[in-house]
Image: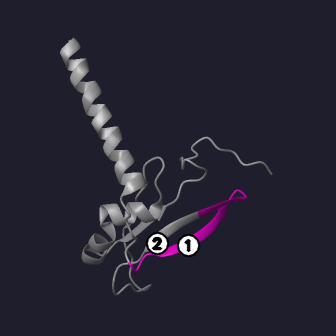
Amino acid sequence: MKLFYDILKNVVFVAISLSFLITYLVPFQAYSADQLRRTSVKNLQRSYFLHLPKNFTSAKTYPLLILLHGRGSNGQKMAGFTGFSSLADREQFIAVYPNAINFPTLWNAFYEPEG
């Protein structure tokens, strides 16, 4: 059993290390068609990258995929890392890459803004 936990500990360490490298050291760029948008939710300013598929028309309905980045990352890096904007063009869906808030960036599941 000790061997299992040692292996698991090493796997977790490698996963965390790779996550750090991807988040902080690899310069991903958002797909050229991705647009930075901003909105306000309960008096809190939020931003996200929106990707509309090629040949988008408002006369048609599209599936929506929301892609959440990991801690310390952002929507732009998520778009570049996953390549889902290219997939959205091919499969005809809308991709949204929201940005978390604060630093390090965290998802505010329990955040209640004052006001």
Residue 103 falls left or right of residue 35: right
Secondary structure of the residue carrying numbered label 1: strand
- Going by the numbered disc 2, the residue's amino acid type is Leu
| Crowd around label 2: few <14 · some 14–19 · many ≥20 (10 Å) | many
Residue visible at 47% across and 58% down in the picture: 74
| Crowd around label 1: few <14 · some 14–19 · many ≥20 (10 Å) | few
Q: Which residue is mark 2?
A: 50
Q: Nearer the viewer, residue 65 or 72?
A: 72
Q: In the image, residue 36 lies at what x, y percent?
A: 52, 73
Q: Earlier in the sequence, mark 1 or mark 2?
A: 1
- Spatial CA span between label 1 and label 2: 7 Å
Residue visible at 43% across and 49% down in the picture: 70
Q: In the image, residue 100 lies at what x, y percent?
A: 54, 54
Q: Is residue 56 above or below residue 78?
A: below
Q: Which residues are magenta?
A: 32-46
Q: In the image, residue 64 lies at what x, y percent?
A: 40, 66
Q: Is residue 59 above or below residue 44?
A: below
- Going by the numbered disc 1, the residue's amino acid type is Arg
Give the farthest residue toward the top.
1
Q: Nearer the viewer, residue 102 or 96?
A: 102
Residue 47 falls left or right of residue 14: right
Q: Which residue is mark 1?
A: 37
